[in-house]
Image: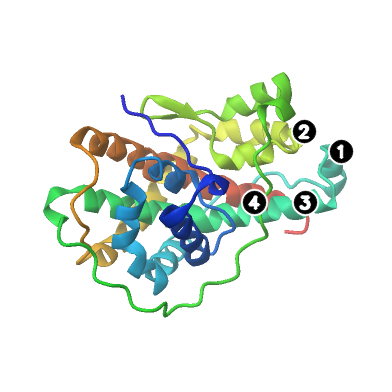
C-alpha cells in the first residue's frame, strides 16, 4: 500500500512554495491543508494538478462554487458552551478568538478541498490528458480576507502521553495508513476543550442524521463539479499507475469522509461557542 508523507509549509521551496502561496490566497485561508501538503510529496504531482486547476481558482470559480454548495445545511445543534465553562477548560479570550478562526478556516478549506479532490479525480482519468492547461490570464477575482493565522500543531512533547491519547481518539484511516485531521490537532492546544469536543463529537460520527448530512454535502459538491471540470486538461501524469491508484484512494477518503465531517463538525462547534 502506497502512503504519502507531508511537506510542511515552512519546508516548501521553489515552485511548491509558490503554489502554497496561491492556495492560501485564492482559497482565502491562512494555511495549506493536508490534502495539498501530501500531494506535494509525490514528485511533480502538486505542480501537475495546480497547472490544470489554477485558472478556475484565480477567477473565483472553484472557491465560490465550493462555498455556495454547502451554505444553509440542515444541521443539529450542540449544547452551547457558556463562557465560564470555556474558561474552566483552559480557553481564555485570545484562545476563544483562535477557536473561531480555526473553525472559519476549515469551513473555507474543506469545501474547496472536496472540489479540488473531485477535479483531480477527473484529471487522473486517462481520457483527459492533453497538452496541459491553457495559459492562465491575470487574476480576475478578489478573494475575501482570510481568517487569522492558525497556531502551529503542538508537538508530541508538548502534548505528553495523556494529550496524545486524547488526540488519538480522532484517528482516521487513510487507505491503510492513519492520521488525525488537522482540526483536532489544532484543538489539542486546549486539552480540556478537546476532551469536551470528544464527548460531544465522537458519538455523532455514526449517527444516521450526521451520515446523511455528510452524504448530502458530497452530493451538493458533485452538482457543482461538472461545469468546473469541463475542458479541464493536464499534461501526462508525472507518476506511475500504482501511485495513481493510491492517489485515488486517498482522494476518496478526503472527498467522501474527512472533508464533509470537517464541514459538519466545524459548523457545530463554532455555533456552540459563546456569542453565537
- Whether residues under marks 4 and 1 lie with C-beta atoms below 8 angstroms apart, the answer is no
As measured in the structure, the alpha-carbon distance from the residue carrying label 2 to the one carrying label 1 is: 8 Å
At x 17%, y 48%, the residue is 125
Q: Residue furthest left?
A: 127
User: Where residue 51 sits in the image (x, y, percent)?
Assistant: 31, 61
As measured in the structure, the alpha-carbon distance from the residue carrying label 3 to the one carrying label 4 is: 10 Å
* Residue topped by disc 1: 88
User: Where residue 270 sits in the image (x, y, percent)?
Assistant: 66, 52
The label shown at residue 228 is none
Tell me, yes or no, if residue 199 can be seen here. Answer: yes
Q: In what element is the residue under mark 4?
A: helix
User: Where residue 84 sits in the image (x, y, percent)?
Assistant: 88, 45
At x 46%, y 37%, the residue is 208
Earlier residue among tags 2 and 1: 1
* Residue topped by disc 3: 96
Residues 158 and 177: in front is 158
- Whether residues under marks 2 and 3 lie with C-beta atoms below 8 angstroms apart, the answer is no
At x 57%, y 41%, the residue is 182
Earlier residue among tags 2 and 3: 3
**Residue depth check, mark 3 versus mark 1: number of the one nearer the observer:** 3
Tell me, yes or no, if residue 213 can be seen here. Answer: no
Amino acid at each position: 500500500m502506497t502512503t504519502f508523507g507531508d511537506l510542511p509549509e515552512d519546508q516548501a521551496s521553489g515552485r511548491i512554495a509558490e503554489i502554497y502561496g496561491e492556495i492560501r490566497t485564492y482559497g482565502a485561508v491562512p494555511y495549506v491543508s493536508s490534502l495539498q501538503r501530501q500531494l506535494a510529496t509525490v514528485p511533480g504531482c502538486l505542480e501537475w494538478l495546480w497547472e490544470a486547476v489554477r485558472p478556475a481558482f484565480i477567477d473565483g470559480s472553484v472557491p465560490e462554487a465550493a462555498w455556495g454548495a454547502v451554505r444553509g445545511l440542515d444541521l443539529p445543534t450542540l449544547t452551547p458552551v457558556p463562557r465560564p465553562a470555556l474558561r474552566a477548560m483552559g480557553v481564555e479570550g485570545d484562545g476563544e478568538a483562535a477557536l473561531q478562526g480555526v473553525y472559519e478556516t476549515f469551513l473555507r478549506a474543506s469545501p474547496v478541498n472536496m472540489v479540488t479532490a473531485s477535479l483531480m479525480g477527473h484529471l487522473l482519468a486517462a481520457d483527459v490528458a492533453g497538452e496541459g492547461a491553457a495559459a492562465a490570464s491575470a487574476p480576475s477575482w478578489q478573494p475575501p480576507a482570510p481568517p487569522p493565522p492558525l497556531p502551529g500543531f503542538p508537538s508530541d512533547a508538548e502534548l505528553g502521553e495523556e494529550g496524545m491519547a486524547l488526540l488519538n481518539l480522532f484517528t482516521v484511516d487513510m487507505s491503510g495508513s492513519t492520521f488525525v485531521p488537522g482540526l483536532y490537532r489544532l484543538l489539542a492546544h486546549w486539552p480540556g476543550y478537546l476532551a469536551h469536543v470528544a464527548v460531544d463529537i465522537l458519538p455523532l460520527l455514526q449517527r444516521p442524521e450526521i451520515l446523511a448530512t455528510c452524504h448530502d454535502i458530497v452530493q451538493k459538491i458533485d452538482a457543482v463539479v461538472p461545469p468546473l471540470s469541463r475542458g479541464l486538461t493536464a499534461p501526462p501524469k508525472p507518476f506511475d499507475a500504482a501511485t495513481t491508484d493510491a492517489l485515488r484512494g486517498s482522494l476518496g477518503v478526503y472527498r467522501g469522509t474527512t472533508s464533509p465531517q470537517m464541514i459538519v463538525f466545524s459548523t457545530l462547534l463554532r455555533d456552540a461557542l459563546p456569542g453565537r
